[in-house]
Amino acid sequence: MLFSCRSLALGGAPLTGLVLLLGSLPSLARAAEFSEMLGRVPGDTNVLVMIDADRLFDSALAREQGWKKKLATQQGLHPVLLPVGSKKLVRAIEVDMHSGTQTKELTLLDFPKGPSLQKIATKQQGYIEKVANSDVAWLPQGAYGTRLGQDLYGFLFPANRQELSAWLRARSGKISTYLLQASTGMKQSGPQIVLAMDLEDAVPMSQLADKLKALKSISESQVDIPAITNVIGSLRGARLGVTLGAQAQGTLTIDFEENVAPLKSVAQALVLEVLSQRGLSIDELESWTAKAEGKSIVMTGLLGDSGLMRLSSLAELPSHLIEDPEAQTDSTNPQLYATQAHFKSVDKLVTDLFKKEWTTFGQYAQWAESYARKIDRLPLLNVDEEVQQYSAGVADLLRQGAESFRGVGIRSYGRQSQVWNSNYVNYDYFGNRYYGTYNAGDQARRAIGGEERMQGALDSATLRREVEQRTGDIRKKMVAKYKVEF
């Protein structure tokens, strides 16, 4: 793996005061509005998402597609899952970059006139308890929710009581230097969505050159490997800004300590290959323009509906956790309404997943796991029990698929490591003894790689067939039960 990350804590003055100081500068005024929320971000955060919901919902694209008017029937289909009326969102995530798994996430939401904790807990069939002398709501989706002020809510996933207590008692956070700098991109005239990853001091230099040589983008080009290794080793982080106007415009910036001139000829191909290997690529990125100047690689281009939906997994606090349930319920038949909404959301998500063109099993595993998490967090209130069982089963299938797809490379490497080239002894015409090696081992390794990839493809096809069969079965049952189309 090329990249892992380390969160760099900020020492000295409290973060809130520092961000407010930065906010006194006109160009950073919008970032200052997030200062209270950023001040609650845990210090071990290495991925940060910021959304200016006010400006996002006021964009031409959001108005044209009627994002504010979409109700619970489209939960899971909405490009950005935020409750209407919310002002700002900050999502702080701790990711193990080696395995690619999230260990903890905290979502902070500025939502004036939002519901009480008791109302949230009642709606989600959870309960209220005391943690660190604060009222918190345990939610069966695997989260704790709390109110940090009149308008500020916090949701911690997973629902770890000790983690919640430590965070509530800490009161203020110490965000890393890189994430703090990236947060200043949230300006009045800038993007409505900012995502940043702290990757400072991440790259193990001892193996970096060999890993770079193994990349197609490097091996098929004539570049200075030592120079490129030096640049990659100075990686600081990556940040993505999404600006919504009539269309969604994205800007991906990858920052280094060293000048990126040695990367100029391979910058875009290298970025695309690494993102693909990590399961983070988006189709539209291939058509983006790229430039490598100074100490950054910058890629810009448009994002379509599918790209926005995949990015929404980075801000997947479901709006149903906090929206007023009375405003979302069809009083004539709430169970039918909620069941249809839930089923359509699951069907839409798996359809989007299966039509995704992936290039590596690691990439497919990342999407499968992300979409399983989306399904887990869909609304359950009033949903038919059989449909709840169906969606839970689909999510489990996707997680099992993700594990299988990740195992393709591991199994292949393990089996290939057991293959040895055969040595032999022979004599030449003059009776001199000489030694040699049969290269049959290389052929055996290639065969093993092919077998594992074929098994992965079969697992993928089996997963799709199983999900489609379950979807067809539950659709028939629900049509027969409710006498309406699903």
Image (cartoon, rainbow, N blue to C red):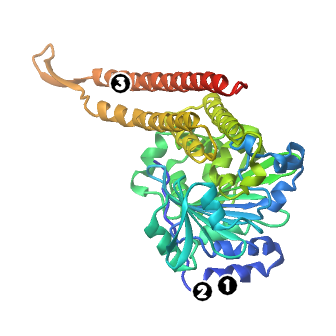
Residue 94 shows in the view = no
Residue highlighted by disc 1:
17
Q: Do residues under tags 3 and 2 come within 8 Å of each other at their CB atoms?
A: no
Which label belongs to residue 448?
A: 3
Give the vertical position of 354 relative to 118 (above or below).
Answer: above
- Looking at the image, residue 461 sits to the left or right of residue 302; the answer is left
Which label belongs to residue 13?
A: 2
Q: For the residue marked with disc 2, what is the amino acid?
A: Ala
- Image spot of residue 235 (x, y percent): 56, 59
Q: Residue at x 89, y 44 (%)?
A: 64
Q: Badge 2 local density, few (<14 within 10 Å), some, or many (20+)? A: few
Q: Residue at x 85, y 45 (%)?
A: 247
Which label belongs to residue 168?
A: none
Q: For the residue marked with disc 1, what is the amino acid?
A: Gly
Q: Do residues under tags 2 and 1 come within 8 Å of each other at their CB atoms?
A: yes
- Residue that lies at the very extreme toward the left in this rendered image: 431
Q: Badge 3 local density, few (<14 within 10 Å), some, or many (20+)? A: some
Image quadrant assignment for residue 455: top left
Q: Marks 2 and 1, Cα distance to the nearest angstrom?
A: 7 Å
Q: Residue at x 46, y 39 (%)?
A: 214
- Residue that lies at the very extreme toward the front in this rendered image: 332
